[in-house]
Amino acid sequence: MKKYIIAIDGPAASGKSTTAKLLAKKLEYVYIDTGAMYRACALRSLWDEIDLQNTGQLEKMLSDISIEIKYSAAGNQIILDGKKVTHRIRKADITKLSSEIAVIGAVRKKMVELQRKMGEKGGIIMDGRDIGTIVFPKADFKFFMVASVKTRALRRWKEAKEKGEELNLENIEKELIWRDNNDSSRKIAPLKKAEDAIEIDTSDLTINQQVKTIYQIILERTCRSDIS
């Protein structure tokens, strides 16, 4: 029974990560959060006080970095060099640093290597910025999720509030615009919709509707028995 590789790309807060997690659970597939891998790499560089302009320091760090994504009922756990960093990598300082480190060729090469190894047997859903274009250009299914900046900023604000964090909505919007420009204009693996990707505008969709939309598309293109 064939196990598919499903790629979900899109800008920050477009809904791709939550949708990917729920879709993976529905299909009984493994969810691989590539964004978390870059965040973990950023955290390691912070721990080691790495100068991102120093190629030698970066290569030494990448040579022995260990990133694992372990499933748990409460959600995937991110393990960096044997330490659980699931919550730490979601802090604001790591969010900004991860975008900076993601444009470095040596870092992307290492992360893509790890991602391909994780997904080589199929039966996985991977989300990020370049999954359908760089990591798995021959993925069985490719989706590109988008939403307006205002919608995405409001989502981030609500998420932060639920966690007890008080963030300024206007600042979140400015940060998202910065990230969009940074991710789309970088020379290495820019945020880009694959030519054969299906675009999903999530601006007016709930998470459940997003999952249902993608699930129905997969069902329409395969036999139900092939994805279960």
Image: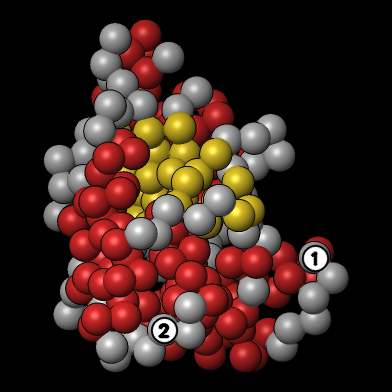
Amino acid carrying mark 2 in the image? Ile
- For the question of whether residue 61 can be seen, the reply is yes
What is the count of numbered marks?
2
Please identify the quarter of the rendering in which residue 129 is found.
bottom left
**Residue in view at x 17 percent, y 80 percent:** 187
Tell me which numbered mark, 2 or 1, is placed earlier along the sequence.
2
Q: For numbered disc 2, what is the local secondary structure? A: loop
Crowd band around label 1 with a 10 angstrom C-alpha radius: few (<14), some (14–19), many (20+): few
Left or right? Give the position of 211 relative to 199. Answer: right
- Residue 5 is situated, as x and y percent measured from the top left of the image, at 29, 34
In depth, the one of 171 and 112 nearer the eye is 112
The quadrant the N terminus occupies is top left
In depth, the one of 171 and 203 nearer the eye is 171
Marks 2 and 1 sit apart, C-alpha to C-alpha, by: 30 Å
Please identify the quarter of the rendering in which residue 173 is found.
bottom right
From what the image shows, is residue 39 above or below residue 172?
A: above
Q: For numbered disc 1, what is the local secondary structure? A: loop
Q: Name the residue under label 1.
A: 163
Q: Which mark is on residue 108?
A: none
Q: Mark 2 points at which residue?
A: 50
